[in-house]
Image (spheres, helix red, strand yellow):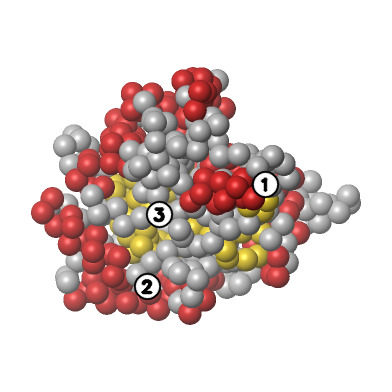
């Protein structure tokens, strides 16, 4: 029986362990986690979601405070269209986050940044252009385009000197999304270096409708592989979503994947950004505690724990401080849902908003417990401690378990 270590991911003349830790915004996939993946010879992701806030916490900058001060007068106004990002400050925050991470990199692996198109930031084109190009400026090894079709994203980077040497790829959930992307970028004469195929069992936002359960990752991988073969395109395919063991990974590698992207198992790593209290919620979860709902203002379904504090919370929109989900005209579905409740309860007290959530604030505070569908199995990957809690794992332990375990075996950590 093969193990994942029998395979390698080839990127030009570079050989990597075919394990990619997926991007998990807002700083759930921390620099520390990504650095471990790179040190061990795989690929780790940081995320540029809410990068100004991440920079404030990592480097003691005050981007959020400054922005809030600038727009303080607008806090009670339901019209958020004036709340804009300063592009120079956005570039500065991105360069800090990426640059410091790249400087700390050791080992033969790589570090990519996850860049979600749905973070429209009240200026979708301009802000995305700055995010992508400043990450390249700061030396990121590669960019994974996600949460959107990214039909114009390659063009936004086309003039950058690193456009043809950085590793650029996209996450899709169907052949159709990939076809659209390739058609739109054809004139640039630059194929993606990799395509992540994310199935319906992943964490975070899903590239499916609420009929997600009718789809299956292995089938989509086979369809995309067939399409690329017909088109005679050699682009490495990376399978993602629900791959829980080394054996799961091997079966995708034997069926045409060049690597696997995983995330859920790393949510309980020491290096993961979630607070320990939240990691214990993930460990304790049972299958019935995990649901897919439509409360994200992005319009994509999202998987999370039922006990997530973000569900039903009626906090005031926080766009003056954050505003990452404001569309091109300064709207966000949460603002509308919130205002509908304010119209019913004008005193603003005890408001509960059920249909949408203020994703910026709740992700920032680790109060939106998004997770993959296999989260309920995390308890089987560790030991129960004397106080009833579960032992957190090192990222290295989880990485090596994927790399070396055979079949459905999972290596437990040594007792503390
Ligand atoms: C907590 C969590 C947060 C995530 N956040 C993002 C994100 O910000 N952007 C993104 O493209 N994917 C995100 N994902 C998806 C992962 O990067 C990855 O592709 C997927 O979860 C892999 O499936 P697995 O979790 O079953 O291993 C997230 C996943 C988890 C578990």
Mark 2 and 1 residues: CB-CB less than 8 Å, in contact?
A: no
Which residue is depicted at the point 53% across and 68% down?
201
Residue position marked by numbered label 1 in the rendering: 345
User: Does residue 108 show up?
Assistant: no
Taking depth in this image into account, of 183 and 315 the one nearest to the observer is 315
**Quick check: 88 above or below 215?**
above
**Quick check: 251 above or below 380?**
below
Q: Is mark 3 within 8 Å of ligand 1?
A: yes
Residue position marked by numbered label 2 in the rendering: 221
Tag 2: Cα neighbours inside 10 Å, few (<14), some, or many (≥20)? Answer: many
Measured Cα–Cα span from mark 3 to mark 2:
18 Å
Q: Position of residue 140 (x, y in %)?
A: 35, 37
Which residue is depicted at the point 30% across and 71% down?
175
Number of the front mark, 3 or 2: 3
Q: Position of residue 71 (x, y in %)?
A: 47, 24
Residue position marked by numbered label 3 in the rendering: 147
């Amino acid at each position: 029986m093969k193990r994942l270590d029998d395979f390698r991911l080839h990127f030009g003349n570079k050989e990597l362990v075919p394990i990619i830790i997926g991007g998990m915004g807002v700083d759930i996939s921390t620099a520390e986690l990504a650095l471990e993946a790179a040190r061990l010879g795989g690929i780790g992701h940081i995320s540029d979601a809410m990068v100004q806030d991440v920079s404030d916490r990592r480097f003691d900058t005050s981007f959020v405070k400054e922005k809030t001060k600038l727009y303080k007068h607008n806090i009670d106004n339901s019209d958020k269209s004036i709340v804009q990002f300063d592009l120079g400050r956005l570039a500065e925050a991105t360069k800090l986050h990426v640059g410091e991470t790249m400087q700390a990199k050791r080992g033969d692996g790589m570090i990519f940044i996850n860049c979600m198109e749905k973070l429209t930031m009240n200026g979708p084109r301009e802000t995305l252009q700055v995010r992508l190009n400043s990450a390249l400026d700061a030396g990121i090894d590669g960019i994974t385009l996600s949460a959107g079709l990214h039909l114009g994203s390659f063009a936004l980077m086309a003039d950058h000197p690193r456009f043809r040497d950085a590793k650029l790829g996209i996450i899709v959930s169907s052949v159709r999304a990939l076809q659209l992307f390739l058609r739109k970028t054809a004139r640039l004469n630059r194929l993606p270096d990799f395509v992540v195929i994310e199935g319906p069992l992943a964490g975070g936002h899903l590239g499916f409708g609420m009929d997600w359960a009718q789809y299956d990752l292995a089938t989509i991988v086979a369809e995309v592989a067939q399409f690329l073969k017909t088109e005679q395109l050699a682009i490495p395919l990376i399978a993602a979503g629900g791959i829980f063991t080394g054996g799961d990974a091997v079966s995708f590698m034997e069926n045409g994947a060049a690597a696997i992207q995983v995330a859920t198992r790393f949510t309980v790593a020491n290096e993961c950004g979630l607070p320990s209290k939240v990691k214990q919620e993930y460990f304790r979860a049972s299958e019935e505690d995990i649901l897919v709902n439509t409360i994200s203002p992005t319009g994509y379904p999202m998987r999370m724990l039922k006990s997530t504090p973000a569900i039903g919370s009626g906090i005031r929109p926080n766009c003056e401080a954050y505003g990452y989900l404001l569309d091109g005209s300064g709207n966000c579905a949460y603002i509308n849902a919130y205002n509908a409740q304010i119209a019913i309860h004008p005193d603003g007290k005890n408001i509960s908003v059920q249909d949408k959530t203020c994703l910026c604030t709740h992700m920032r505070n680790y109060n939106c417990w998004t997770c993959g569908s296999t989260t309920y199995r995390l308890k089987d990957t560790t030991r129960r401690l004397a106080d009833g809690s579960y032992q957190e794992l090192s990222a290295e332990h989880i990485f090596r378990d994927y790399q070396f375990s055979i079949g459905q075996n999972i290596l437990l950590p040594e007792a503390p």
